[in-house]
Amino acid sequence: MIRLSPPIPYTPAFVVALPHGIAAGIHLPPRPDPVPKEVLARLHPDERALAQSLGGFRQVQFVGGRLALGEIFPELGLRRSPVLTNVHGAPDLPAGVAGSVTHKNDLAIAMLARGSPGIGIDLEETDRDRPGVASRVLRPEELAAVEALPADRRWRDTAIRFSVKEAIYKALHPFLLRYIGFGEVAVWPSPDGIDRVEAFLGANEGTFAFDARHYWVESRVLSTVRVRPVVARGTDG
């Protein structure tokens, strides 16, 4: 389990090395008040200018995500670079760095690693059931597996699958550059946190290897995914 520091807004919640990269969390305030000037001053000037164009929770979440990224760059031995937003709404990371950002209510989390694109993360709440989510995000075989569980385990299992799928979509997007539906992957959670993934992508979209994992951040599930294209080996004639 990843443990959090005391919840002081805009301060680090944790920094931890995970198999897919270094993850950092930043505590967020409970209200969408304008981000204080002294907090904005901690951003790169280009990020600060973008943050000042945002309002409400969008500003709070953007700032939290960039502060989290700022915690990781020195951990990787890299100079702090501005991370704006690309045309797809994802973090626009420097060349040679892969990463992802997620946020949920009072916490923003970022992950970075050296290397090529293909990293996704997601954070989901598990302490309250959300009726209707399972039928919307699970394939029939996943739904059948969830419904076979004891009633008190169904939402937790659904939330893990949901979170891993969200992380998969972020990791896959740089390769496919399109919306990816919930039915295009199936997730099979494991008690050890190393989850199995089946993909049902288009026939001409290539083959990918998935390394999917989930962790507990108190009552929340944090999923991290690394996706790599699989290059088929040629055969001798």
Image (cartoon, rainbow, N blue to C red):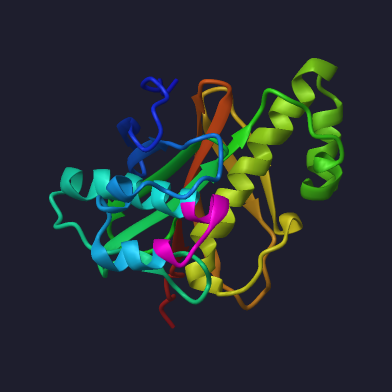
Span colored in magenta: 51-59
Q: Does residue 58 sit above or below 30 in this rendering?
A: below
Horizontal relation, residue 96 to residue 141: left or right: left
Where residue 93 appears, as percent x and y from the top left, is 33, 65
Q: Does residue 18 sit above or below 204 in this rendering?
A: above
Where residue 38 appears, as percent x and y from the top left, is 28, 46
Question: What is the number of callouts on the image?
Answer: 0
Q: Nearer the viewer, residue 55 or 16?
A: 55
Where residue 88 appears, as percent x and y from the top left, is 53, 72
Q: Nearer the viewer, residue 105 or 3?
A: 105
Where residue 60 appears, as percent x and y from the top left, is 48, 49
Residue found 55% across the figure and 75% down from its top:
177
* Residue 139 included in the magenta stretch of the image: no
Residue found 32% across the figure and 52% down from its top:
40
Q: Nearer the viewer, residue 47 or 177?
A: 47
What type of secondary structure mainly makes up the magenta span?
helix
User: Please, which residue is most extreme toward the bottom here?
Assistant: 237
Quadrant holding the C terminus? bottom left
Q: Nearer the viewer, residue 66 or 179?
A: 66
Residue found 66% across the figure and 69% down from its top:
179
Q: Does residue 11 sit above or below 192 in this rendering?
A: below
Residue found 73% across the figure and 34% down from its top:
158
Residue 216 visible in this rendered orientation of the protein: yes
Q: Does residue 154 sit above or below 109 in this rendering?
A: above
Horizontal relation, residue 49 to residue 55: left or right: left
* Residue 55 included in the magenta stretch of the image: yes
Horizontal relation, residue 151 to residue 57: left or right: right
Residue 197 visible in this rendered orientation of the protein: no
Quadrant holding the N terminus? top left
